[in-house]
Image (cartoon, rainbow, N blue to C red):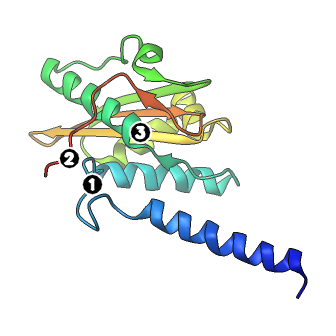
Amino acid sequence: MTFSSRAFRLACVLAAAALLAGAAPAGGGKKTCWEPTDSEKQFRKLINHERTLLLKHKLRMDPELSHAARKHSGVMLRKDRLFHTIKLGDRITGWQVIGENVGYGYGVEPLHAAFMDSKGHRENILHAGYRNVGVGVKTKEGKTWVTVIFEGQDDPGTTLDMPKCKK
């Protein structure tokens, strides 16, 4: 084995260790401060399924985008009115390309199907420039409200305060 291949192997081991360390939940395996709900995970799964059918990369679920999305879904639920986030570009930081789908209905799969049947919503789901997705779902009396935020940067942020970890 040459020195360069040893160095390469060491770099691979260190990179894998760093990835594993970064992937571990905060607090030594305890639940992190922000967790997607089952419905939010299901939306991401359906979105990524559509993307992989067309050989597009999967989107990473981003907690800050999801926090902003969940907050907006809660506002729509309280007002019982469907509308896009006002000044989305100010609420999400460090973005180059951004999009949003909002909807309400009676379940994740029917809502996702409606998005896919709508040209603009479908374009957001399949846009090649997006890297991250944030999904926020709120449900009341069987009615599901969803906000899906798409973003293209490696590490998007939000002007909203993130949930604090409980000690």
Question: Which structural element holds mark 1?
Answer: loop
Disc 1 + disc 2, Cβ < 8 Å: yes
- Give the mark nearest the N terminus, 3 or 2: 3
Apparent side of residue 108 relative to residue 144 in the rendered image (left or right): right
Identified at 47% across, 59% down, the residue is 22
Q: CA distance from mark 3 to mark 2?
A: 20 Å
User: Which numbered mark, 3 or 2, is in the foreground of this view?
Assistant: 2
The residue labelled by disc 2 is 165
Please give the residue where the numbered disc 1 appears in the rendered image: 32
- Counting from the top left corner in percent of width and height, residue 67 is at 31, 35
130 to 75, vertically: above or below: below
Give the image location of residue 56, x and y in percent: 68, 50
Quarter of the image where one finds residue 84: top left
**For mark 1, does the 10 Å Cα neighbourhood hold few (<14), some (14 to 19), or many (20 or more) residues?**
some
Point out the residue furthest to the left here. 141
Q: Amino acid at mark 3?
A: Gly
Residue where numbered disc 3 is placed:
134
Mark 3 Cα-neighbour bin, 10 Å: few <14, some 14–19, many ≥20:
many
Q: Identify the amino acid type marked 2.
A: Cys
Answer with mark 1 or mark 2, whichever residue precedes in sequence: 1
Identity, as a three-letter code, of the amino acid under mark 1: Thr
Of pointers 3 and 1, the one earlier in the residue sequence: 1
